[in-house]
Image: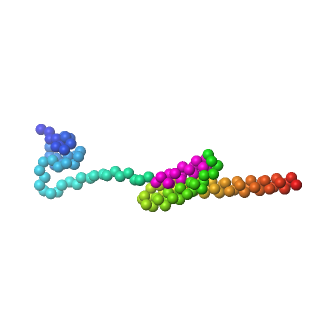
């Protein structure tokens, strides 16, 4: 005759003292050596919105705005990096990526401005 778990209704082995499905005690257990029941708790980590925003703005600035929003992405990314410490490192990678992309685009923007000014100056000198 088959036994069924009184807790979940799963079919039990004839000599089982615990349900293999839900871990409930079945029958009388009087030796005190109960099998441990492993419970997994899924906790969702809090997202780091500032790090995500800094990363996204740095990409948008690089591809669509020619670097004009880099100051904003740099600020968001730095704030996201600071917040990552209080959120167990969540968002640290995105914040660092946002800072790196922002710095690279700023350096490229400055180089383009400087070379453009030198080219303009050289053109004016040659026209004299």
Residue 26 to residue 106: above or below: above
What's the residue at 50%, 54% (across, down)?
Answer: 51
Point out residue 100 in the picture as x, y percentages from the top left corner. Answer: 57, 56
For the image shown, how many numbered marks are present on the structure? 0
Magenta stretch mostly in which secondary structure?
helix
Residue pictured at 19% horizontal, 40% vertical: 9
Residue lying at 60% horizontally and 49% vertically, measured from the top left: 61
| Quadrant placement of the C terminus | bottom right
For the record, the magenta segment spans 48-63
Query: Which residue lies most toward the right here?
Result: 128
For this view, does 38 lie left or right of residue 56? left
Point out residue 44 in the picture as x, y percentages from the top left corner.
38, 51
Horizontal side of 97 relative to 14 (left or right) equals right
Q: How is the image coloured?
A: rainbow
Is residue 39 among what the camera can see?
A: yes
Q: Position of residue 98 (x, y in %)?
A: 55, 54
Residue nearest the observer in this picture, 55 or 10:
55
Please name the residue shown 16% across and 41% down the image: 4
Of the 4 image quadrants, the one containing the N terminus is: top left
Residue 57 belongs to magenta span: yes
Residue 38 magenta-highlighted: no
Q: Position of residue 11 (x, y in %)?
A: 19, 40
């Amino acid at each position: 005759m088959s036994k069924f778990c009184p807790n979940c209704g799963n079919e039990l082995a004839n000599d089982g003292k615990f349900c293999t499905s839900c871990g409930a005690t079945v029958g009388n257990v009087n030796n005190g050596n109960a099998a441990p029941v492993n419970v997994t708790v899924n906790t969702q980590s809090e997202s780091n919105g500032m790090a995500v925003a800094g990363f996204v703005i740095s990409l948008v600035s690089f591809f669509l705005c020619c670097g004009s929003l880099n100051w904003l992405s740099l600020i968001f990314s730095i704030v996201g990096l600071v917040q990552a410490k209080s959120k167990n490192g969540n968002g640290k990678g995105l914040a660092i990526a946002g800072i790196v992309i922002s710095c690279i685009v700023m350096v490229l923007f400055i180089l383009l401005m400087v070379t453009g000014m030198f080219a303009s100056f050289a053109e004016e000198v040659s026209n004299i």
